[in-house]
Image (cartoon, rainbow, N blue to C red):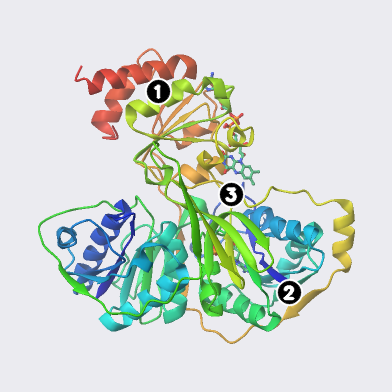
Amino acid sequence: MKILVCISKTPDTTSKIAFVNGNTKFDEAGVQWIINPYDEWYALVRAIELKEKDASIVLHLVTVGGADCDPIIRKALALGGDEAIRVNADNADSFYIASQIAEIAKQGGYDLVLTGKETIDYNGSAIGAMVAELLDAPYISLATKFDLAGNTATVAREIEGGEEIAEVQLPLVVSCQKGVAEQRIPNMRGIMAARTKPLKVAEPAAVDALTSIVSYELPPPKAGVKLVSPDNVAELVRLLHEEAKAI
Amino acid sequence: MVLVFIDQTEGHIKKSSFEVLTYGAKLAAQLGTTAEGLLLGTVNDELPALGKYGIKKVHQVSSDTLNHLDAQVFAKVIAEAVTSTGADTVVFSHNQTGKAVAPRVAARLKAGIVTGASALPDTANGFVVRKTVFSGKAFANVKIDSPIKIISLNPNSYHTAAGEGTAEVVALNIAVDAPKVKITAVNKVSGEVPLTEADIVVSGGRGLKGPENWNILLDLAKELHAATACSRPVADAHWRPHHEHVGQTGIQIAPNLYIAIGISGAIQHLAGVNRSKTIVVINKDPESPFFKAADYGIVGDAFEVVPKLTEEIRKMRAGG
Ligand SMILES: Cc1cc2nc3c(=O)[nH]c(=O)nc-3n(C[C@H](O)[C@H](O)[C@H](O)COP(=O)(O)OP(=O)(O)OC[C@H]3O[C@@H](n4cnc5c(N)ncnc54)[C@H](O)[C@@H]3O)c2cc1C
Ligand SMILES: Nc1ncnc2c1ncn2[C@@H]1O[C@H](COP(=O)(O)O)[C@@H](O)[C@H]1O
């Protein structure tokens, strides 16, 4: 059994969002980079749990990006996993990234590919589905539970107002979110071990991106809060009804 | 032609489909072409009536297999429908189904996709779609360079508009593969308004002190026919079920009205709710960061303010 977990690098959740170069580039000044929370807390931790139960599982991590991703992928390796592969390429667009991941997945013959439900910077929710299509594999998106028994996966996925439980045979691609696993803190042993785990660098496959970011914009600032006295709650109801037309 | 994917469940067309139909028809008018719908599976709703959103035809692949989502099966059918109808633009809702299917269709057709779109594209100079990025803290304008273009539209970001019109229903004959995903159970939270579909959401944080105090919030939600949500620490402490947790790591919502009670408004919480149209904050701390993101606020004790609010709404509803 071989599992591939897709790891992306994102700005820390508290980062100030600003743009430079005429609003065409994210301002990286002072930004702390982290493993995308969905990839770390859910996809990676669940894969590690599966490996802890079944030591024969081979667990690899993949990231598409430049050398600036190395500290992030090492951090991921400190949590667990046998080795990591970095496809040495710019993140051109979702299709480009998905094509690189699919290429690695095909070459490595993985039975299961796990992604996060979305990156917290681009908010694509797209790459897992694309990888599945490029591998012609079934896809479970927005998984909230994931279990394996032999070649059969049992998953729960989010639907409007609830969840759906399904069984699928591997090979399979799954995007993970809250519920799949619980956040873990890497320990000293893991951090030491990660230093000697292989981090292979692969050259990208030739693929054309299909989209490009032209510019960024910040939302217009809120007009400012209208405060209502706690002794005049009726006024709030009036404003919500007449002004905001919300009730 | 603009082809709009019509999402359905349990025999009914989803509300988000009306938004994308309206959006698709507007986009078609902007491009000087027509919009048509694509429905997989079978529904009880009247399909010709969908013409009132501005579409001319509804293509239907009426196989029972398609009443349940298997992204692989759906993607193949939709891609074939795109090819056979000659559509060059495809619109989905960026809801649970859209997230599973739209990028697959895009990869299959080598079509550029913008997910999480929040406005009509700018087609004056190419095809540039605005989407939310950084969890609602910014927008990106993304250009699609491929001949076929796919957009998935954020739920609640485009107003449904219905006029006159009837759509012609056309049966599409497309082979449907056997699904590989076997659905064994569906657990719906019964009797509650689903959070991601709700118009109004009432949400509580650690300021409510404990699960035993939730009744004031539940009463308000009931009066407003609202869904209920909570902050992450509240779900982590098991005061409320996990499916109510909104925010960066929980569910992202964009209701018409979000009422936050005893929630500080940490940036990770805001990431899940800042696309709400109107935000009301009730917090006893005037320095709470949530007030900066709010439209209306009351600085006060939730235990006094919330029951009063419920009462005032009841009065208003009663016509008083
Ligand atoms: C990577 C990461 C991801 C995260 N993801 C999420 C997420 O998805 N969702 C999320 O919610 N959080 C998330 N968090 C946690 C977030 O940072 C905050 O800690 C959390 O949102 C705080 O929850 P709270 O507002 O309920 O509690 P507190 O911060 O404890 O705030 C309680 C508020 O209640 C007010 N209050 C107290 N008593 C009363 C009263 N009687 N009447 C009225 N008001 C009162 C207080 O003034 C205070 O503002 C995340 C954190 C990290 C680091
Ligand atoms: N550059 C990348 N390298 C590896 N995996 C990625 C990369 N970008 C995104 N992913 C994976 O794809 C998921 C969805 O990303 P997105 O479609 O951009 O929201 C993420 O949670 C990651 O698991």
At label 1, the amino acid type is Asp
Q: Nearer the viewer, residue A113 or B133?
A: A113
> Label 3 near label 1: C-beta < 8 Å?
no
Q: At x 56% / y 66%, what residue is drawn?
A: A168
The residue drawn where x is 53% and y is 35% is B265
Which mark identifies residue B219? 1
Residue occupied by mark 3: A16
Mark positioned earlier in the residue sequence (2 or 3): 3
**Chain letter behind tag 1:** B
Residue A73 vertical position relative to residue B271 in the rendered view, above or below: below
Residue B278 horizontal side relative to residue A129, left or right? left
Q: Quadrant of ligand 2?
A: bottom right
For the residue pair A190 and A13, the one nearer the viewer reads as A190
Camera-nearest residue between B320 and A138: A138
Q: Quadrant of residue A81?
A: bottom right
The disc numbered 2 marks a residue on which chain? A
Left or right, A66 with respect to A232, comes to right
Q: Residue at x 68, y 58 (%)?
A: A35
State the CA–CA distance, disc 2 to disc 3: 30 Å
Q: Secondary structure at mark 3?
A: loop
Three-letter code, disc 3: Lys
Queried on whether the Cβ of the residue with tag 2 lies below 8 angstroms from ligand 2, the answer reads no
What residue is disc 2 on? A85
* Label 1 CA crowd tier, 10 Å (few <14, some 14–19, many 20+): some
Q: Position of residue A77 (x, y in %)?
A: 79, 62
For the N terminus of chain A, the image quarter is: bottom right
**Residue at image point 47% right, 77% down:** B107
The residue marked by circle 3 belongs to what chain? A
Q: Are marks 1 and 3 on the same chain?
A: no
